[in-house]
Image (cartoon, grey):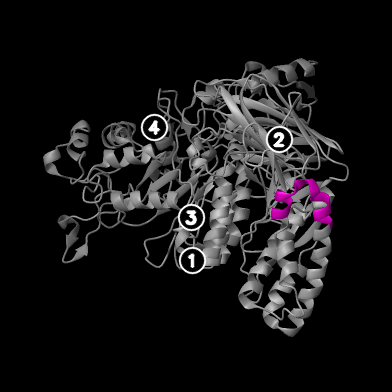
């Protein structure tokens, strides 16, 4: 038995750990599975590896032969050795870290409740764990897919969807049993192999108390970091199962641009390849292919009738900054009609003239190497950017300890990772470790409010296994026709999802083009889609944080507020990054209303409701009314939100100007992340961070930008900035680096402007060397605080809705005033035209608001047609 001396090097270890974790993660992402010897304690047939102060690996082997290879889940164990001490207490081995005390009875055999325990002693709680102990507080992880489900229930059997166990538990611990997961060998392309001992034990114990994010951070240190997808993936995707031609897809792109909608990814379903040939049929019916699917389901050869010149099609899309992915069904293997059949058959030692189907042998390394080289690489060289391997096979393959879907994802992703291009696949979840192979395709869910209502919880909860990039079929997939309100609300949820991708089954009744819907629905969808694209700098920065920390972009409220019961009860609320809370609307409005009442719990602190400009105190439940084009989105007071211009139609391009939307109410700081968006060089340290800090006081706001840290070859050298200050009145003076900035009615550079319709000041800073520091000082007149403007933006929107109804419906003008309503509804325009009178205009508006409410109450009592609009005003609470 090996005992280690007591270590009194806490400070030194912290410094070492910080240095280690601040290095480019590229150094750690190639499997480095053997721990430092100093981290290992061996006692006969047991071995313990202290990986972090919260994480210990526990192994038992009857032969005392232990595993130092990577498993399909755990690939890194060579971490900085944390301080710990070992000692013997009678028959017991004791290992103690800062937070864990492990006791094992020496030479007592397999781990059981009688010979092994771990005590967690943290700042928030203390408990004792032992093998076999039930984890009753587990907050779950995710599921393989939502195929054939209507919300959380199977649409045919009615059985509830079972989510797998997660890493996060209210019990304060989690245990991952790695004993039966397959291993990876040490070849150049690591390949799967079974474990040598079936009876051995290999556990990973995470003890973290209420520090849920610690569990995820430790997990990605040993299981691999979730890679950052290419920047284009965070933009807008088009996908629909339909027999599109090259010409139709070009027209679709042009329609997106005609309606001023961004488009970043074109996902082409299976009809890109040959699906019908005479030999596919017998007696008028499709024959079955090997694997059981109908002939034509699998294919790897362009249908030249639909795509006469595939290279030209792909080049045209790339010229429009659109990435292209293609669907693959692999079930039938490679059939004789495929363009590359003969070459592949010869390479595999088969006789092409026999024209026998070549089975898809996923676990055969030679086959997969030749399949990628001969069948897929020529398509990639034409310009295909990534693949959608659509198989749905979670059966255990010929190698015990790994399911088919996991190995499919591993092979496709690792193939895509060869070279400098940043890899991406669209595939299904396959168990722990799947976070290394983004993106997840959640499958064919029903078109229903139930499905929409389940997806926010499902998406955020997947963060509990670090699976942060679920991509849902926005609008649902099948068994419905997407009523306009349902599709609109799904699009709004999609705007605040990890990935925005529309999709549906092949049905002429299901429409996914936003502009085909009635105008009010299209307008609401357009607004959400454009906001999504504007938020890409924020989303991309949060993706970098997820890469470093393991905390997904969408994650549950209880990560930040574990002591608040409401953080667990309001399951459809989630953090979108670390500054925004979203509570998507997932049920329809009552037909007698023009809004929906929605209850949201806001955590302690102050929050701004983005759709209304209300300042809300947290630590309570708020009941608010939302119109069709409004989404319950709440931003931390003072938060800095990096954005890009509304006319940006592509995610891949670095924004210039970079917009900094700074919400009032508190000071803040952020480091905005950028890289080239398309290669893996970010893993080698080629990226930049733009530090931005704000200091808000009663009468001034100071914003400091830069200097930029780091570099990459394609970075912007000189950049413009646009500073936006929403929900506030105009300032009295603005300075940049000590120089006064002039007011400009036409928004020119340099200058500042006030958009009264948004209650927003905008400051335009001309192109500046990114290595220079910019200090912006904004001075406000006395009395210009957030409370003065709180909720005015939402009131303006509601009054405009009322004014439009009155114009169409009419009322008794001898008793009721159109002028009062219209004047109040246009208060934003008056603020833009007369910013120097803003305080007086706002006071007048607040008085008009109360008068209009009183008037609307009277007219609604006389004419029920007015009741929805009176209720719209009455339900607007502050």
Say which residue label 2 marks: 214
Mark 1 touches mark 4? (CB < 8 Å): no
Disc 3 crowd, CA 10 A, few/some/many (<14, 14-19, 20+): many
Element class at badge 1: loop
Residue closer to the observer: 677 or 333 = 677
Please give the name of the residue rendered at 44% of the width and 55% of the height, measured from the top-left corner: 503
Q: Closer to the camera, 131 or 712?
A: 712
Q: Residue at x 44, y 59 (%)?
A: 512
Secondary structure found at label 3: loop
Which dot marks residue 473? 3
- Reading the image, the residue beneath label 1 is 482
Residue 185, position as x, y percentages in the image? 44, 26
Disc 4 designates what residue?
Answer: 415
Count up the numbered dots: 4
Q: Nearer the viewer, mark 2 or mark 3?
A: 3
Q: Nearer the viewer, residue 448 or 208?
A: 448
Mark 4 vs mark 3: in front: 3
* Distance between the alpha carbons at the discs numbered 4 and 3: 26 Å
Label 4 element class: helix
The residue at the point 29 percent across, 51 percent down is: 247
| Mark 3 or mark 1, whichever is nearer to me | 1
CA distance for labels 1 and 2: 41 Å
- Residue 834 is one of the magenta-drawn residues: yes
| First in sequence: mark 1 vs mark 4 | 4
Give the x, y percent position of residue 59.
61, 30
For the magenta stretch, what is the residue range?
Answer: 829-843
Whichever of labels 4 and 3 marks the residue nearer the N terminus, that label is 4
């Amino acid at each position: 038995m090996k005992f280690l001396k007591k270590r009194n090097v806490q400070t030194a270890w912290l410094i070492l750990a910080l240095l280690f974790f601040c290095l480019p993660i590229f150094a750690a992402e190639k499997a480095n599975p053997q721990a430092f010897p100093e981290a290992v304690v061996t006692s006969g047939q047991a071995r313990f590896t202290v990986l972090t102060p919260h994480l210990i690996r526990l192994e038992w082997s009857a032969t005392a032969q232990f595993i130092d290879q990577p498993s399909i889940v755990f690939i890194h164990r060579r971490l900085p050795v944390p301080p710990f001490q070992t000692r013997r207490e009678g028959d017991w081995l004791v290992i103690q870290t800062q937070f864990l005390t492990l006791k094992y009875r020496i030479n007592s055999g397999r781990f059981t409740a009688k010979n092994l325990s771990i005590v967690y002693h943290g700042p928030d709680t203390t408990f004792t764990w032992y093998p076999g102990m039930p984890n009753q507080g587990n907050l779950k992880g995710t599921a393989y897919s939502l195929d054939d489900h209507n919300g959380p229930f199977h649409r045919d059997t009615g059985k509830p969807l079972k989510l797998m166990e997660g890493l996060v538990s209210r019990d304060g611990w989690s245990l991952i049993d790695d004993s039966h997961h397959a291993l990876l060998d040490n070849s150049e392309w690591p390949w799967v192999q079974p474990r040598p001992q079936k009876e051995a034990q290999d556990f990973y114990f995470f003890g973290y108390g209420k520090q849920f994010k610690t569990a995820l951070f430790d997990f990605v240190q040993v299981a691999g970091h979730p890679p950052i997808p290419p920047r284009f993936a965070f933009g807008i995707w088009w996908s629909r199962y339909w027999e599109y031609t090259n010409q139709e897809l070009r027209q679709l792109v042009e329609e997106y641009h005609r309606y001023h909608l961004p488009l970043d990814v074109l996902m082409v379903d299976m009809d890109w390849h040959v699906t019908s040939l005479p030999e596919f049929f017998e007696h008028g019916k499709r024959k079955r292919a090997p694997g059981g699917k109908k002939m034509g389901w699998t294919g790897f050869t362009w249908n030249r009738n639909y795509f006469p010149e595939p290279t030209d099609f792909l080049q045209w899309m790339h010229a429009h900054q659109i990435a292209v992915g293609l669907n693959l069904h692999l079930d039938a293997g490679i059939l004789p009609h495929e363009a590359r059949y003969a070459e592949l058959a010869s390479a595999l030692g088969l006789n092409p003239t026999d024209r026998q189907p070549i089975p898809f042998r996923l676990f055969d390394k030679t086959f997969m190497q030749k399949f990628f080289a001969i069948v897929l690489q020529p398509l990639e060289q034409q310009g295909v950017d990534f693949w959608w391997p659509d198989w749905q096979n979670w059966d255990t393959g010929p190698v015990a300890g790994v399911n088919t879907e996991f190995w499919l994802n591993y092979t496709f992703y690792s193939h895509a990772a060869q070279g400098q291009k940043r890899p991406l696949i669209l595939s299904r979840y396959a168990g722990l470790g799947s976070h290394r192979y983004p993106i997840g395709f959640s499958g064919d869910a029903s078109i229903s409010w139930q499905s929409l209502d389940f997806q926010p919880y499902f998406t955020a909860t997947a963060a509990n296994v670090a699976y942060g990039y679920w991509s849902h079929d926005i609008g649902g997939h099948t068994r419905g026709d997407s009523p306009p309100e349902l599709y609109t609300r799904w699009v709004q949820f999609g705007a605040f999802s990890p990935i925005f991708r529309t999709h549906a089954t092949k049905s002429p009744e299901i429409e996914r083009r936003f502009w085909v819907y009635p105008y009010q629905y299209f307008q609401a969808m357009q607004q959400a889609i454009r906001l999504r694209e504007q938020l890409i700098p924020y989303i991309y920065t949060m993706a970098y944080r997820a890469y470093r920390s393991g905390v997904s972009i969408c994650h549950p409220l209880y990560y930040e507020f574990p002591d608040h019961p409401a953080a667990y009860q309001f399951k459809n609320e989630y953090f979108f990054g670390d500054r925004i809370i979203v509570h998507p609307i997932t049920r329809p409005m009552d037909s007698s209303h023009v809004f929906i009442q929605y209850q949201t719990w806001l955590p302690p602190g102050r929050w701004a409701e983005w759709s209304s400009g209300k300042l809300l105190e947290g630590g309570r439940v708020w009941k608010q009314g939302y119109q069709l084009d409004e989404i319950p989105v709440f931003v931390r007071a003072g938060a800095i939100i990096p954005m890009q211009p509304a006319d940006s139609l592509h995610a891949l391009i670095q924004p210039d100007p970079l917009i900094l939307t700074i919400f009032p109410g508190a000071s803040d700081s952020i480091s905005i992340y950028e890289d080239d968006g398309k290669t893996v060089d970010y893993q080698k340290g080629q990226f930049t961070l733009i530090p931005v800090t704000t200091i808000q006081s009663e009468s001034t706001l100071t914003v400091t930008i830069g200097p930029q840290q780091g570099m990459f070859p394609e970075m912007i050298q000189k950049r413009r900035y646009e500073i936006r200050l929403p929900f506030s009145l105009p300032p009295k003076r603005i300075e940049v680096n000590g120089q006064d900035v002039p007011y400009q009615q036409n928004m020119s550079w340099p200058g500042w402007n006030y958009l009264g319709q948004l209650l927003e000041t905008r400051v335009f800073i001309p192109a500046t060397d990114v290595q220079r520091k910019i200090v912006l000082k904004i001075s406000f007149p006395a009395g210009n605080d957030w409370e003065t403007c709180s909720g005015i933006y939402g009131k303006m929107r509601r009054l405009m809705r009322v004014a439009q109804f009155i114009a169409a419906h009419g009322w008794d003008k001898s008793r009721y005033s159109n002028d009062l309503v219209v004047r109040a509804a246009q208060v934003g325009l008056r603020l833009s035209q007369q910013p120097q009178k803003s305080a007086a205009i706002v006071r007048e508006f607040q008085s008009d608001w109360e008068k209009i409410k009183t008037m609307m109450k009277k007219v609604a009592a006389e004419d029920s047609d007015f009741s929805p609009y009176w209720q719209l005003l009455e339900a607007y609470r502050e």
